[in-house]
Each structure stands twice: as C-alpha cells, then as structure tokens.
Amino acid sequence: MRHFHHPDTVRAAEAPLLAALPEGALMRRAAYGLAGVCARDLIDRTGGTAGRRVTLLVGSGDNGGDALFAGAFLRRRGVAVEAVLLAPDRAHAAGLRALKRAGGRVVAVPRRPDLVVDGIVGISAHGALRPEAADLVAGITAPIVAADTPSGVDVRTGVVHGPAVTAAVTVAFGALKPVHALAPARCGRVELVDIGLTLGAGELRAYDDADLAALWPVPGPADDKYSLGVLGVVAGSDQYPGAAVLATGAAIRATSGMVRYAGTAREVVLAAWPEVVASDDVADAGRVQAWAVGPGMGTDGAAADRLARVLDQDLPTVLDADALTLLAEHPGLLSGRTAPTVLTPHAGEFARLVGPVGNDRVAAVREAARELDATVLLKGHVTVIAAPDGTGVADTAGSSWAATPGSGDVLTGLVGKLLASGLAPLDAAACAARVHGLAADRAADGAPTHAAAISAAVPGVLVALLRD
C-alpha cells in the first residue's frame, strides 16, 4: 500500500533531520536522487549522458536549490547543464555556486535541451505559474522531470488553476504527496527518492496489486457457493434491463459465490446469466449476505419501496445510480442503519446528495462520508474513496477508458460481491475500483471500449493479480 502525505506532515518529518545534519545535506540527498533519475532517463532515451544537454528551470527557494545541486551532479556525468533563473536575486546561493563550480552555465533561454528539470516552485506553493514561467514552460518540447511536484499543480488537491507543468517524470523527495495520486496526467511516472524521513500512515493511501492479492476472496478447500458470500442484486427495469445484466454479470465474475437477482428484468438477466437465482421481488429473493442496489432500477414509488425494504434488512449494501437519486430525495432511508453502506456517486449524484464536489475532492468525500455515515466512492479519472472515520483512498489504477455507459453498473456488482464475501466496506470499494480500472485498461487496449467488455476483462485481471 502506498501512502501519500500532506506537505505539512512532510515538513514536520524533515525538521529533525535538518537540525541533526550538516547544513544543506538533506537538499543534496534529494538532488542526488533527482540527478540519478535524470541520468537514467537520458540513458534510456538517448543511450548515454555524455554530451547531452539539460536545462534547469530554477525558481526561488529550496526547490530551485534542489534543481541546481542536481545540475552539479549531472555535470560530473558529462552532461551539459544550463540554468534559467526565474528569480536571479533569490536563487539558492549554495546551489548556484555548486553548479558553476561544476561547469554549469546560467542562460536566459533554453537551447534545445534533451531534458528539462522543473525546479520552479516546491510543495509550499499555490496557484498557477506566473506569466514569465508560463511562457517559458509553454515553449518547451523536451521531456520535463519535475522536482518533487509539477509546478503550478496544487500539491494537496491536484487541481490546476491555470498554466502548469506537465511532467514526464516526477521525482518525489522522501514521501509521496497527494498530487502524485490525484494528478497522474500532470505528474507522469512518479519516482520516490529516499532521503531518510520517518513517516507513519499517510493522510491518503492507495491500494496496490499486492493488497488486492491479499484481500480478494478466493475459494479454499472447505468453501462452497454459500460460504463465499451470497449477493442480492436489485437493478434494471423494463426501460433499462441492460443495467441489471451488467451489475449481475460483474458480481458473478468477481468471486465464486452465489448471486441472487430481484427485480423486473428477471427474464433478461436469466437469459444472460442462467446461473443466477432470480425472482421478481426483494421479498422472494432468499437469504443474502449483502445487497447491490440501483443501476437502472428507476426512481418511481415502486423503486423507492424496493430500496426501503433492502435498507431495512440492515445488511451491507452498495447504492448506485437510481438508488442515489432516491436517497437524495429521501435521506432518512439511511437512518438507523448499523450495517456498512457504500455509496458510489459520480460528481452529479454527489452534488444531489451533499452539494458540489469543489476543488478538493478528497476533503469533499471525507466530509460526505462523515455526514452520511457511509463509505463514499466518488467516481472519476482518479476515484476517491473515504470511510466515515476519515480514512481516504485514491484509486491510481483508474483511467478515462472506464468513462463509458454502464461502466458504473459493473463497478456496483464488484463492490457488492466483495461486501457479500465479508470484506470491510473501504477494502471492498478500493479493491473493486482498482480491478475495475485495470479491467477497463485491459478491455480498451488503446481504443474505445464498452461496459460489457470491461466486465468480461475482470477474470483476466484477477488471474494476473492472484497468480503473481
């Protein structure tokens, strides 16, 4: 599991090292790691470092110092290094001396660099690039390696308010920060450099493949179709039968446990999935360990009644789509529940439930989870999840390939089946979101895809994860 730490937490962890180490030692550690990543990138792309040209974009303060010291280290590997000083009177003095002693030069304009190092601003900065820096960045065609964070991208939220750097690689110093999870398109590949910080759990975390392999339910010698968890699905309608097929099919593919369907799309579901035990009504569904409710079920009085009867059973439940619309209209439906509830809104559904998301998606989801006493999964290019206790997760496996009609129905089935198998709601939501994102990438394979293909790709993703 990867942990992402707030900038204030990182600065607090740096303080004892800054007090104990010789002046500038911590910066040199970071710069050495930055230079190493730059050298490897040059070797991978051009075959070597000797004679290659690197331009440093140097702002004021420590981030500019990191870039300058990294430039000095690169000079020792035969790289021609030039620095553009955006604030010459406030450039890091020791770093500038080190660069010049190593043979680096200060220039006004980059001269066809093979690589550019972004040292404009650091993790304390806010807002977009200033005009001079924005113009400079706009004219760059070479790959950019960002020092700790891409300049102009909010470190805490990943939001871009104007001109900003888009990096091919971001070198994180000592710890991953929220931006590295929340703005993957701006950060590019993220490389973590150890500079000796001691940190606990991060304010935001991300599940990795090892977490999925450890948590995902697989049948043991004593298991049967009931012991692996029985999920009840309430989805679909005469108008939207496909939603029932997609949600039910994803649940079937998620684990070996049983799936029951209760709803008006019974015949369509059975035609697609004959292994499902199907009924027309929640009261006739039979015993289940969890429910998945909402996709395509409608928002009329009958649908509201079905939702209320499911929630009254006080079993682990995931609510999506039409169930969220009904919940926004009847918020009292969650009152008195003690069993876990997972809500999986997109931004519009989120706004109807608790208000607009705003710029800080993590803070918004945490507040919603606390207010609703539910685990909330806010879908997006980076899906953000929070538990009622404030624990936050970013799904870094997400991609735009999942942005296709019916994709959310597949996610609902996955979350529901994991809840039925006994996973904690945050684990169920995070594992399902990651597998969903990986399945979307596999199904797309570089071209537009569709929800049924995403569902069909789930077993292949699980095979790869569980075998490794």
Image: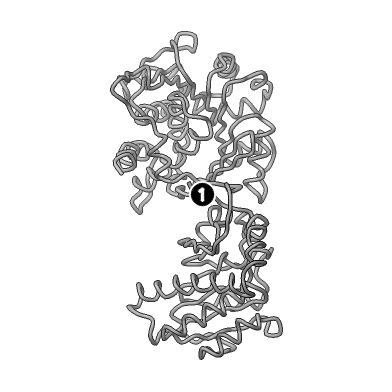
Residue 444 placement (x, y as % from top left): 36, 48
Q: Nearer the viewer, residue 265 or 50?
A: 50
Left or right, residue 300 beside residue 223: right
Q: How is the image coloured?
A: one colour
Q: Nearer the viewer, residue 383 or 346?
A: 383
Residue 157 placement (x, y as % from top left): 63, 54
Can you say whether 413 is above or below 282 in the image? below
Can you say whether 352 is above or below 161 in the image? above
Left or right, residue 88 beside residue 435: right
Which quarter of the image is occupied by the C terminus? top left
User: Dot 1 lies on which element?
Assistant: loop
Residue at the spot of label 1: 381
Residue sitting at x 32%, y 39%: 466
Residue sitting at x 62%, y 46%: 362
Amino acid beneath label 1: His
Left or right, residue 316 beside residue 417: right
Can you say whether 115 is above or below 122 in the image? below
Residue 103 placement (x, y as % from top left): 51, 91
Q: Residues within 10 Å of mark 1 (few under 14, many from 20)?
A: many
